[in-house]
Amino acid sequence: MWEKDCNGNWYQTSQMPENRKPEIHRGKPVRRGLTPKEETIQKAICKFLDGLENVWWFKVHGGPFQRAGVPDIVACVSGRFVALEVKRPGNRSTARQLSCQRAIDKAGGIVAEVTSVEEVLELLGRHALVEMADYRGEEGMK
């Protein structure tokens, strides 16, 4: 059987060096470098939110003194509560995160799992909270 190693090179499974085997996360091989890190996606989304008018947001930094499952970015957009759980493409929310997301939705907030700035823009547009014309870009940031 042939298999790709962590660098994308092909080996027969029996001949693959131990230190070159792909990293497995939740039963799937992790492809390092092919998708942006979650932190990179979060920074891009925060930068995008900075460029919008009528938006207040903060980045949640999890810790032992905080409720588990709270989304990564919490915002108020044009008077509506918005919570964004940022994930790398292919990753999904944990059971605790899903429970928190259901509670936010039940309370009337807008909550979503997003993997890019484009998904955030689409979500806000779907709820009529923002249009691309409202985006000030980097030159309009504070």
Image (cartoon, rainbow, N blue to C red):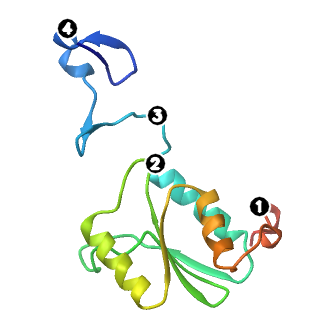
- Image location (x, y in percent) of residue 20: 27, 20
Q: What residue do we see at 60% from left, 69% from top?
A: 123
Instruction: First in sequence, mark 4 or 2: give its number.
Output: 4
Name the front one of labels 1 and 2: 2
Q: Residue 33 has which mark?
A: 3
Q: Are marks 1 and 3 in contact (CB under 8 Å)?
A: no
The amino acid type of the residue labelled 3 equals Gly
Q: Residue 89 has which mark?
A: 2
What residue did someone put label 4 on?
15
Q: Are marks 1 and 2 in contact (CB under 8 Å)?
A: no
Instruction: First in sequence, mark 2 or 3: give its number.
Output: 3
Neighbours of disc 3 within 10 Å: few (<14), some (14-19), many (20+): few
- Image location (x, y in percent) of residue 19: 22, 21
Q: Report how far apart the C-alphas of labels 4 and 3 lie in the structure.
A: 24 Å
Rendered view: 96 above or below 27 = below
Work out which quarter of the rendered image holds the N terminus and state it. top left
Instruction: First in sequence, mark 4 or 1: give its number.
Output: 4
Dividing the picture into quarters, in which one does residue 142 lie? bottom right
Helix, strand or loop at mark 4: helix
Residue 137 vs residue 2, the one in the foreground = 2
Dividing the picture into quarters, in which one does residue 119 lie? bottom right
The amino acid type of the residue labelled 4 equals Gln
Helix, strand or loop at mark 1: helix
Instruction: First in sequence, mark 1 or 2: give its number.
Output: 2
What number of labels is visible?
A: 4
Q: Report how far apart the C-alphas of labels 4 and 2 lie in the structure.
A: 30 Å
